[in-house]
Amino acid sequence: MYSRINENIKTIRELKNYTQEYMALRLNITQAGYSRIEKGSNRLSFEKLEEIAAVFEMDVRNIIKFDISHYVEPGFKSIAGTGQGSVLNRLYSDKIALLEKLLEKTERELNLYKNKFGCL
């Protein structure tokens, strides 16, 4: 059961596009220490699992019962993208589109202020 929880933690981290370094920073541990959690080399305390759940903005039960099939399409083979990762591709595309919209809005606001205050 513990190894499944550790695998779930790794999968969720990858789906959220978090690095091990980011998780370690948020958990106030070293990257190597965090890596050992994912590998199952260190026994995971319930308190640390609660901290991980908080970083993921999830309930501990959802980490324990995590099933990737609820989040990706059938045929998806790898989070790293070696399989059919169309769900992740869509998520990245949506993220890029949102960032482009925010950039456009920021540029419009910047131009508005430049015109208002006579800046170049």
Image: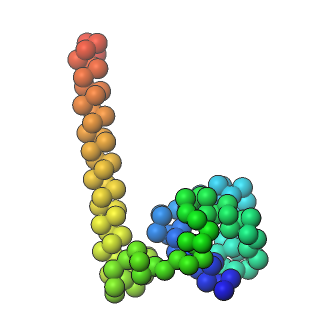
Which color scheme does this rendered protein use? rainbow
- Residue sitting at 30 percent across and 58 percent down? 94
- The residue most toward the top is 118
- Residue sitting at 60 percent across and 76 percent down? 64
Quadrant hosting residue 120: top left
Indicate whether 103 appears above or below 56: above
Q: How many marks?
A: 0
| Residue 106 visible (yes or no) | yes
Quadrant hosting residue 107: top left
Q: Which percent across, then down, holds residue 39?
A: 66, 79
Left or right, 1 with reference to 14: right
Left or right, 65 with reference to 117: right
- Residue sitting at 33 percent across and 72 percent down? 87
Left or right, 2 with reference to 43: left
| Residue 21 visible (yes or no) | no
Q: Which percent across, then down, holds residue 24?
A: 66, 60
Q: Which percent across, then down, holds residue 41?
A: 73, 80
Indicate whether 100 appears above or below 53: above
- Residue sitting at 31 percent across and 34 percent down? 106
Indicate whether 113 appears above or below 4: above
Depth order, front residue of 82/9: 9
